[in-house]
Amino acid sequence: MESNQGRIVFLSVPESLRSRIAPEPHDHDHRDEEPDDDDFTIDPSIPIPVELRPGETNLDLEELSWEMIISGMLRVISAGEKRLEDPPPGQKNPLENNPGSGLDPDDIDYYRRFVLSVRPRIRGEFTEAAILHARNGDFAPALEILDVLQGLFPRSPALLLNRALVLENQAEALERAGRETEAEAGFKAAHEGYRRLLALEPPFPDSFFNAAFFYMKRHNFDQARECFISYLPLSDDDEKRLRAERFIREIEKGGLDDQMFREAYDLIRLGEEQEGMERIRDFIERHSGVWNGWFILGWALRRLGRWEDGAVSLRKAVDLGGGNSDTRNELAICLMEKGDYAEARKELESALREEPENVKIISNLGVLSLKTGNAVEAAGFFRTVLEIEPGDPIAKQYLESSQS
């Protein structure tokens, strides 16, 4: 999947192609795909889209390849309905007077069947490529590939779920990099993907299971609980059902489905810390042994610059079992601002062991090194930040100023 795309042209089916389709054996392993069409034949009356090489404006029929045809069809399918571009200078568009040039849904369906006849294993190949890109942090090409597959298999809930998961992973990577605004937009896109999945009929069980974990990470435990409950009667996976039942019990036992908890998180996230603290303190009064409430309170206090009170609340969250990287990073910031550098380093190093490529944690270690007068160590941390996130403004500013 190249991002540097060439121009799409439509042409009548060359005589040389009309008997050249020889489909490979099909794999019937996806219940949600469209039916295979083993008897597909080329319809000479339907023009075929071809993608030219980047920069080219004219097509040499002697160089026409299946790759150019399939690539052109995939782009047209993904677009849904394609308007013909103006022909390049000196080249007549073979469809310019064709009233069917708007490409109706039957044309798109024909191209789908064409592609699947020539490349019956395309779903597995493209899915593997998308997963590989996502694992390497190359989210844009992963999403581009999944969009192409969604065009080929528009009734596939599994592909919708894969796309929601990639959007979620992309947002989490942006959040780790400290790009909060972009991360928030990414989480909204992932939420919209899960919303579409949860509305499918018939319901797709795995969408409820994965959406539940998405909502838990977003501190929307009420919605997570509802997703787990919806999942139980739909699934025959005993292991996943046991996990869902366990999380339902934990949410209910901790009172995390309490409306006050969700309201507090949303208010603080939107910059209404004082009002958010009122909500979370009400929650803590009723659920004092739940670490999540103390974390939310400590987070609000840290944002308000109340370092001493924030450290106390965040330490309470750790003691109650919430010693994850987010809690320790927040606690380290409070300790750092209080001047307790040794304890701040312990918390940051513990957080880094959990998330070795979290840019926020590494950057905070750089800031801590500066506060303790170790400029060489600080530069090392900031260089590491730029290796992971080349556009990080804090690291770039420090390294540029240190060299001037």
Image (spheres, rainbow, N blue to C red):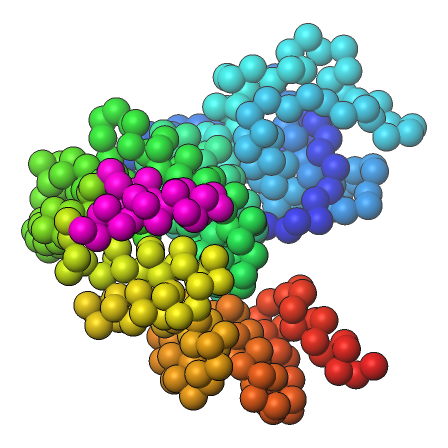
Residue pushed farthest top? 99
Q: Main secondary structure of the magenta part?
A: helix
- 247 w.r.t. 401: above or below: above
Q: Nearer the viewer, residue 80 or 45?
A: 80
Q: Is residue 78 visible?
A: yes
Q: Residue at x 46, y 77 (%)?
A: 338
Quadrant for residue 40, please give it.
top left
Front one among 351 and 390: 351
Verify whether residue 240 appears in magenta. no
The residue lying at 38 percent from left, 75 percent from top is 351
**Which residue is located at x 46 percent, y 85 percent?**
341
Q: Is residue 278 magenta?
A: yes
Question: Can I make out residue 247 in this image?
Answer: no
Vertical relation: 27 (above or below) 342 = above
Where residue 348 appears, as percent x and y from the top left, is 42, 78
Q: Start and end of the magenta stretch? A: 259-285
Q: Is residue 332 above or below residue 392?
A: below
- Relative horizontal placement of residue 119, taking residue 351 as reference (left or right): right
Give the quarter of the figure containing the C terminus: bottom right
**Image coordinates for residue 345, horizontal then vertical, percent:** 44, 84
Looking at the image, residue 106 lies above or below residue 118: above
Q: Is residue 257 left or right of residue 91?
A: left
Asked if residue 102 lies left or right of residue 115, the reply is right
Q: Nearer the viewer, residue 387 or 21?
A: 387
